[in-house]
Image (cartoon, coloured by chain):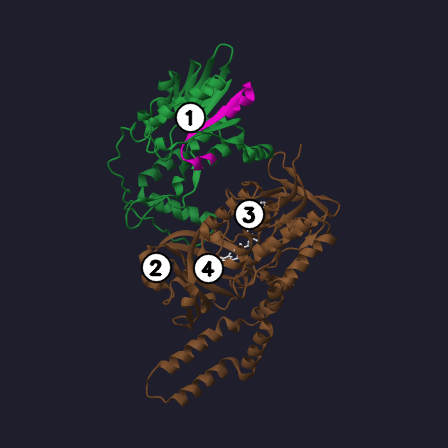
Amino acid sequence: MHIVVCIKQVPDSAQIRVHPVTNTIMRQGVPAIVNPYDLYALEEALRLKDQYGGRVTVLTMGPPMAEAALRKAISYGADDAVLVTDRVFAGSDTLATSYALASAISQISKDMPVDLVFTGKQTIDGDTAQVGPGVAKRLDMQLLTYVSKVRSLDTENDEIVVERRSEGGVQVLKTSTPCLITVLEGNNEMRFATMANMFRASRYPVKIWNKDEAGIEDVTKTGLKGSPTVVSKVFAPTPRAVKAEIIQCESNEPGDLSVTLLAKMFNKHPKLEKEIAKRAV
Amino acid sequence: MAEKFDVIVVGAGPSGNSAAYTLAKAGLSVLQIERGESPGSKNVQGAILYSDALERMIPDFRDDAPLERHIIEQRMWVLDDESYIGSHYRSDAFNKEPYNRYTMIRSQFDKWFSERVKAAGALVICETTVSHLLLDGERVIGVMTDRQGGEIYADAVILADGVNSLLAKKAGFHPELQPKDVALAVKEIHFMPQELIEQRFNVKGTEGVVIEMVGKITKGMMGTGFLYTNSESVTIGVGCMLSDFKKQGTTPYALLEEMKAHPAIKPLIQGGEMKEYTAHLIPEGGYNAMPPIYGEGWMIVGDAGMFVNAVHREGSNLAMTTGMHAAETLIELKNEGKAFSAANLKRYQAKLDESFVMKDMKKYKNMPDVFHSNPQFFNDYPEMLSNAARTMLTVDGVDKKSKEREIRGTFRRRRSLFGLLGDTFKLWRAFE
Ligand SMILES: Cc1cc2nc3c(=O)[nH]c(=O)nc-3n(C[C@H](O)[C@H](O)[C@H](O)COP(=O)(O)OP(=O)(O)OC[C@H]3O[C@@H](n4cnc5c(N)ncnc54)[C@H](O)[C@@H]3O)c2cc1C
């Protein structure tokens, strides 16, 4: 079994600031991390590998510095890593990105046929959730989105059963492989890498592919040229007008603190107090 | 099978990076382990970079190191509650390349240094904590990390794990750090546009200004404040001895808030956006508080060995120099086919004795004691100086001779002639 996990290096959005004067996003000095949803996808893939054997290849398209994200994935236990990087990819939107990734996955499957492709639910910097579905479509694979868990895999009959989160409940779905799965958080917290894998990651020669090695056939489908999306305006939302309130309290004792806080809350929402009082009996 | 290296370096601050770089460049197999997400991600410094120590290892560091501003002006301020008196030294000589001192931001600098370490051939593993040393009797034979399958072996381990080295303590190389031997420093970085910094500090291009402060900002505690200009931000901070914080019951954060509100300081940071707040310990116990720095298969470098010159606010340069000398010692021994035994590692101590490191450590060895037992240096004198200046500069019909008499009188009333003489003597002795 061969699983390809598509990951992306993103700026840690928790640490992005907006320039106070020009109102533009300042990326300088903001650390790069692996898109958190992609880590859930990778962990899910690694669990399948632990259970059913096989190989996990991580793939990213990005600038040369994205190699760090792949190395990190190797430290968690991925077997191989491919970085697709070329100037022609600069400015790619989701359409162009899915084209490049689909080409690269086709190349990867020449080495060993790919049964499953995993991606995160979405990235935290683009938030589109379009790349995974785009890749599935281009590779003509089954598509399962919002998956929180893979229940089982039947390698004999090429079938997979997953849990999909939907409004109001969880769907249990079965489909045939090869398929593409976009993953969200479940109980698939990323594991803690072993020492041996840390060594492997720091020595592993990441495969670096240019457009030809990635099997790109039509360059006009890549980069800015292949990207019909237009971002017409970027702006920082104005901060919320409501200011935090500081509540004075007699002492720092937890008991006092909670009593004061509750009194304050009930004062504002008398209905809530009644409601809780009713239920307390 | 467990991995084995010539040397394991624990920590990727300036001391660890200097050691790992020097060792790897000489062809030894080196593993460097850092607990932070990346080198520097957890590290805190003012920060002034002194070129000399780095230049000895990496002569071309200016080509690509992330430097903020070269320093052309140094201000020393003594503050009371509403004034400052002090000196400004600014010289165009500091504008001649190669520059001698720079401001820098440690998280960026450490990352840059680490790239050099990797390029020299060392294996660098981050996000991994060394939990203890592996011992064979007295001899250190490797480290244990917090990861599964965590034991790694080496012929020597260099402890570059910074102030309050838990590893050295666990191995029994030195006792618990005393609150009187460490300062607790807090600092903030305030982002502001380049043009504003240029106007406010009267600088252009990459020129920068440093302000060192003593006085009532530390409320009688032994400590100093500082303000440094970076390219697009200003760093402001204050540090005092941990024992003093304990005694006073003041928090470092409150101290910094009050300092920022001082009439001389407030206008300098006004309009900035606070970007980061950090706190860190500085080992300031000096020579008398130093632990042993080598033994069977191990050496201690940088802050872990108390190598800080608190009087001159130097730390990173001592860290780099000790890291480099520790590495050179191992390289020499390896070339001579000698073991990394305590007897042979003594050469490290000898190298430090020869260098400015030990000479400076010894020169100021009594300083901490003098300041600890004489809080008037941080409280009374600043006020007295400021009053003296104000008396002299206020034109109010009183003749200058009477003013001088009045100033002498206050000095004596506050400290007594005997006290004044005694203080001068103590300071002189400590500086000797
Ligand atoms: C507020 C402040 C201002 C300062 N200003 C200046 C200045 O202007 N100029 C100057 O020269 N010096 C200054 N110093 C001092 C200077 O920062 C230190 O002397 C210097 O950083 C010491 O370097 P080091 O490599 O020994 O330790 P550190 O820089 O502390 O590095 C130690 C490293 O070891 C890692 N580590 C620790 N334990 C483990 C473990 N068990 N396993 C793995 N990794 C571990 C840490 O994460 C860290 O990266 C200042 C210090 C402070 C706090």
Circle number at residue B12? 3
- Say which label, 2 or 3, has the lower sequence index: 3
Tell me how far mark 1 sits from mark 4, CA to CA.
Answer: 50 Å
- Badge 2 and badge 4 both on one subunit: yes
> Residue B84 placed where, x, y %?
40, 71
Looking at the rendering, the stretch of residues picked out in magenta corresponds to A45-67
- Give the letter of the chain under mark 2: B
Amino acid at the residue labelled 1: Thr
Amino acid at the residue labelled 4: Pro
Check contact, mark 2 vs mark 3: CB within 8 A: no
Closer to us: B241 or B53: B53
Q: Which chain is rendered green in the image? A: A
Tell me how far mark 2 sits from mark 3, CA to CA.
Answer: 31 Å
Amino acid at the residue labelled 3: Ala
- Badge 1 and badge 3 both on one subunit: no
Name the residue that disc number 4 marks. Answer: B98
Nearest-to-viewer mark from 1 and 4:
4
Q: Within 10 Å of the Cα at label 2, are there few (<14), some (14-19), or many (20+) other Cα atoms?
A: many
Tell me how far mark 2 sits from mark 1, CA to CA.
Answer: 45 Å
